[in-house]
Amino acid sequence: MALPSRVKIVEVSPRDGLQNEKEFVPTDVKVELVDRLSAAGFPNVEAASFVSPKWVPQMADGADVMARIQRRPGTIYSVLTPNMKGFEGALAARADEIVIFGAASEAFSQKNINCSIAESIARFEPVVQAAREAGIRVRGSISCALGCPYQGEVPVEAVADVAQRYLAMQVDEIDVADTIGVGTPKRVREVMAAVTRVVDPARVSGHFHDTYGQALANILAALESGISIFHTSVAGLGGCPYAKGATGNVATEDVLYMLRGLDIETGVDFDAVVDIGQWMSSHLNRKGSSRAGNAIAAKRAA
């Protein structure tokens, strides 16, 4: 299959990237991060999360962040909403898109939220319904689509089944997420083939973690499977809570560098993203995990 000529990058660092940080990141910094990403040309920024501050204290200032960001016309600002209370927060914050999330692994679903996959997804029905009535886009994320920290292998049919359930709810976009970064290209091809049998590939995105160093190879496999939407995080921000010390989301700089080498358009300013990654890493007092970002920063400093 020919590779797509253009790819949509969903930048997830303000939410997925920062949510595991132990030290609270000041609201001013979060706002500046979103504003810099908007200016760099990202078509979609995952900006905040409307979850209970008790569970994710880092995301407690979501309403403030959304109120203060400079919205760039045409950019989609997404927020995570686990329930109706979260949706009400998202609605008040004028989010362009809400994100719901269910797992493809029964063990993960039971362990995390004490219910089956089917029950967890049924809980989102009123949220999706309310979003549709309000004219807000809905994205459905499928966690553990390529492997689970508790049950290990996840059947391909289980991933396709969750995708089908989302489709029945009229979700706009469906994320196939390798939550723990265990996927390899062969498995990515199998999972994407199963999902795109039931969902138009134009509505499917890949969300890869680089825990085992496979993310770029997995993105290439997904591109070859007809996928043209990917989630990335500047400087590789975001740990993996199930693999101690492991890197989390694939670094935006690395993905942009690879796509540029494949002559695939993104509309995102690569140099600006390198700057953002270095700036954010210095705020967190550590070196970012983007190989391309760090190499270019070192070259500039030479």
Image (tube, rainbow, N blue to C red):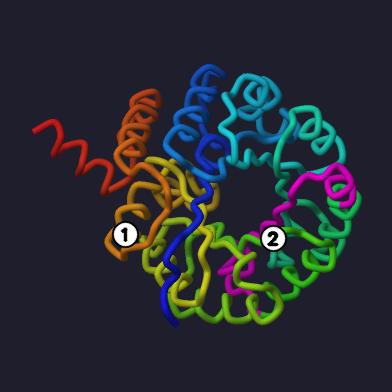
Range covered by the magenta-colored residues: 129-156
Tell which circle, 1 or 2, labels the residue nearer the N-terminal end. Answer: 2
C-alpha span from label 1 to label 2: 32 Å
Kind of residue at badge 2 = Phe
User: Quick one: quadrant of the C terminus?
Assistant: top left
Lateral position of residue 176 relative to residue 54, left or right: left
Is-magenta flag for residue 138? yes
- Residue 87 is situated, as x and y percent measured from the top left of the image, at 82, 38
Image quadrant containing the N terminus: bottom left
- Local packing at callout 1 (Cα closer than 10 Å; few below 14, some 14-19, many 20+) is some
Element carrying mark 1: helix
- Give the left or right position of residue 158, taking residue 282 as reference: right
Looking at the picture, tell me which residue is in the foreground, 187 or 165: 165
Regarding mark 2 in the picture, which secondary structure is present there?
A: helix
Residue type at mark 1: give it: Met
Q: Residue at x 74, y 31 (%)?
A: 94
Marking on residue 217: none
The location of residue 16, given as percent across then percent down, is: 56, 42
- Residue 258 is marked as 1
* Figure check: 152 above or below 299: below
Q: Which residue is mark 2?
A: 108
